[in-house]
Image: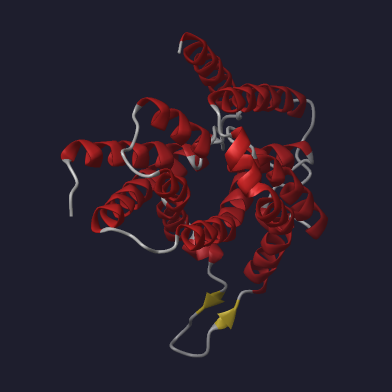
Amino acid sequence: MNIDMIKIFKVIFLGIVEGITEWLPISSTGHMLIVDEFLQLNASKAFKEMFFVVIQLGAILAVLGIFWGKMFPFQFKDKKMPYIRKDVFSIWFKTAFACIPGAAATILFDDYIEARFQTPLVIAVALIFYGIAFIQIENWNKKRSPKINRLSDITWQTAFIIGVFQVLSIIPGTSRSGATIIGALLIGVSRVAAAEFTFFMAVPVMFGLSALKLIKFGFHFTGSELLILGIGMVTAFLVSIFVINFLMSFIKKNDFKIFGWYRIAVGILVVVISLIH
C-alpha cells in the first residue's frame, strides 16, 4: 500500500466537503468537482468518478442513523412479532415511485452528462440559476401558506412531481437535495416536510447510483484505493451527522434564501476563476 499523508488530508477535506454539501441545497457533486480542480486527488479518472459518488454512502448512513425511528417500517414490542408501521411503508412506496423519473434519466443520460457537462462553467451556471430560483420561490412563499405540512401528508401525485424535479439534478451544480426541495416548495410542501422527503429519496437514489458506479469501476481496488474510499466515507458520515441536525433546526425558523445567495456567490466565483485560468 502506497499512500502519503498529503493524499489522506485531501481525502479528509473532500469528505468534509461532501458531508456539508450533500444535505445543504448547494450541490455536493458541483463542490467536489470544483475542489478537485484546485486540490486534485492523485488517482485515475475512473476511480475519481466512482469516488465522488460512492463517498456519499457515508452521508447516507448518517441519515439512516438520525432518522432510523422515522424510516424503519417495523416496530418490536416485548419480543413478539414485529408491528408493521403502515404509515412508514406508505412513505417508502411513495419514495420509490418518486425515484422512477430520476432513475430513468440517470440510466439513459449519465454517461453523456459525465462526458460533456462536468465543467466549471456548467456548474457555475447551475449554481447561479438555482440560487436565483430559491430566492424567488421563498419570496413567493411569503404570500401563501403550505398545503402539506407533514411528511405523512405527501400524496402519490406530490411524490411523483417532486421526483420529476429531481431529474434536474443530473446536471452538475444543480444539487439533488436542492432540486427536490425546489419542487416540493413550488407545489406547497412545507420546508421541514420537503427536507424529510429529500432524506427518504436520498437513500435508494444514492445506494442505486453507488451500485452503478461500483459495477462500472469493476470492484478491482488496490489497498490504497480502499483506504481512500474508507477515509472519505467515514469523514462524510461524521460531518453529515452535524450538518443534518443543523439543517433541520435551521429551517424550522428560517427559509432557504441564504443558500440561494451562497449558490450565486460561489457560481460567480467559479466563473471569475475559470476566466482567469
Residue shown at 46%/28% (left/top)? 34
**Residue 223 in view in this figure:** yes
Q: Nearer the viewer, residue 16 or 188?
A: 16
The reply, left or right, for residue 87 in relation to residue 43 is right
Q: Nearer the viewer, residue 104 or 239?
A: 104
Residue shown at 30%/41% (left/top)? 11
Q: Quarter of the image holding residue 66?
A: bottom left
Q: Quarter of the image holding residue 181?
A: top right
Q: How many marks?
A: 0
**Residue 174 in view in this figure:** no
Q: Nearer the viewer, residue 193 or 57?
A: 57
Q: How is the image coloured?
A: secondary structure
Residue shown at 57%/29% (left/top)? 254
Residue shown at 45%/13% (left/top)? 277
Quadrant location, the N terminus: bottom left
Q: Is residue 12 above or below residue 212?
A: above
Residue ranking furthest to the bottom:
80
User: Residue 253: x and y, percent?
Assistant: 56, 32
Q: Nearer the viewer, residue 151 or 158?
A: 158
User: Residue 184: x and y, percent?
Assistant: 72, 43
The reply, left or right, for residue 190 in relation to residue 71 is right
The reply, left or right, for residue 235 in relation to residue 272 is left
User: Residue 20: x and y, percent?
Assistant: 43, 38
User: Residue 19: x and y, percent?
Assistant: 41, 42
